[in-house]
């Protein structure tokens, strides 16, 4: 198995004992990691064509991702295995979604997931060994890797791309001094009427359409236009910042995004 480590909140699950040391921890089985590499089912509204073959075309959206983990808890003693069992059954037991990271073959991917269920069964004739299963639910099915940063040039232009295999939603970060600003790309635009003060940071999230100023939500009426767009995999999209009579710099942060 190529998995090296799955980092859960408060626990690392290993593909094998580290450096050939005696087993003491929570380990994946040979087929103990399912659903992470699969494309989730695509859902769409389907309407049959009247007196014609097929359906009307409709955009599809990926369902939430479900990942199944399973393997062994192995340690030198029954008491130590009980310790690892309690560590495992406490993971995500508060019902929240948290960051889960997978490290494999020199790559790092992460996503936000929550617990569906955990099951642990101690072996009757070898009580230092237990079989375990866990199912995780990722409401946002996309996985993320490195973040790509590009800054606008002297005329406010920035070319944005990433190395994932799915469409990515960048963060637009604008600094400077201007009565307002806008960024345009792919025929769409975000236009901010709130003045940009020196030392302030305006951040527009292209996934949510939310504008924040120094980390706080912008007051109502700060946006004149609030389009959202994505950067497709394998493509480069030009973004242009305009600040009118002021000065400004655009920084674009785009995560490698995977499905």
Image: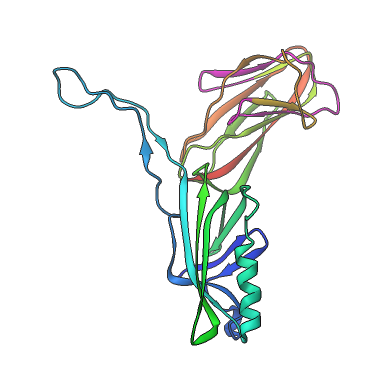
Question: How does the figure colour the protein chain or chains?
Answer: rainbow
| Residue 76 sits in quarter | bottom right
| Residue 195 sits in quarter | top right
Whether residue 209 is visible to the viewer of this picture, yes or no, is yes
Which residue lies most toward the right here? 198
| Quarter occupied by the N terminus | bottom left
Residue 184 located within the stretch drawn in magenta: yes
Q: Residue at x 40, y 45 (%)?
A: 40
Which residue lies most toward the front here? 124
Q: Residue at x 52, y 41 (%)?
A: 140
List x then y, in percent, for residue 95.
62, 49
Whether residue 111 is visible to the viewer of this picture, yes or no, is no
Q: Is residue 126 above or below residue 108?
A: below
Q: Residue at x 73, y 15 (%)?
A: 220
List x then y, in percent, for residue 87.
65, 67
| Drawn side of residue 110 relative to residue 68, left or right | right
Q: Is residue 21 above or below residue 210?
A: below
Q: Which residues are magenta?
A: 183-209
Give the camera-side residue of 211 and 152: 211
| Drawn side of residue 203 relative to residue 234, left or right | right
List x then y, in percent, for residue 255.
59, 43
Give the camera-side residue of 31 and 103: 31
| Residue 156 sits in quarter | top right
| Drawn side of residue 3 relative to residue 180, left or right | left
Residue 131 located within the stretch drawn in magenta: no
């Amino acid at each position: 198995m190529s998995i090296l480590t799955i980092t859960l909140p408060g626990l690392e699950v290993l593909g094998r004992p580290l450096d050939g040391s005696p087993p003491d921890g929570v380990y994946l089985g040979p087929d103990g990691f399912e659903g992470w590499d699969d494309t989730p089912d695509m859902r769409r509204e389907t309407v049959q064509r009247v007196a014609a073959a097929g359906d009307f075309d409709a955009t599809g959206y990926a369902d939430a991702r479900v990942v199944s983990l399973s393997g062994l808890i192995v340690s030198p003693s029954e008491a130590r295995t009980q310790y690892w069992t309690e560590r495992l059954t406490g993971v995500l037991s508060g019902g929240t979604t948290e960051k889960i990271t997978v490290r494999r073959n020199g790559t790092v991917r992460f996503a936000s997931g929550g617990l569906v269920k955990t099951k642990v069964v101690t072996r009757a004739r070898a009580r230092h060994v237990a079989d375990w299963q866990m199912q995780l639910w990722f409401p946002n099915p996309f996985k993320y890797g490195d973040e790509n940063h590009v800054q606008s040039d002297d005329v406010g232009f920035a070319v944005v791309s990433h190395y994932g295999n799915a469409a990515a939603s960048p963060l637009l970060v604008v600094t400077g001094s201007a009565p307002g600003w806008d960024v345009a790309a792919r025929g769409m635009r975000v236009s901010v009427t709130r003045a940009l003060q020196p030392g302030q940071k305006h951040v527009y999230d292209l996934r949510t359409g939310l504008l924040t100023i120094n980390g706080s939500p912008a007051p109502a009426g700060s946006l004149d236009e609030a389009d959202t767009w994505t950067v497709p995999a394998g493509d480069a999209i030009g973004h242009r910042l305009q600040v009118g009579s002021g000065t400004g710099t655009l920084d674009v942060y785009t995560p490698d995004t995977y499905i």
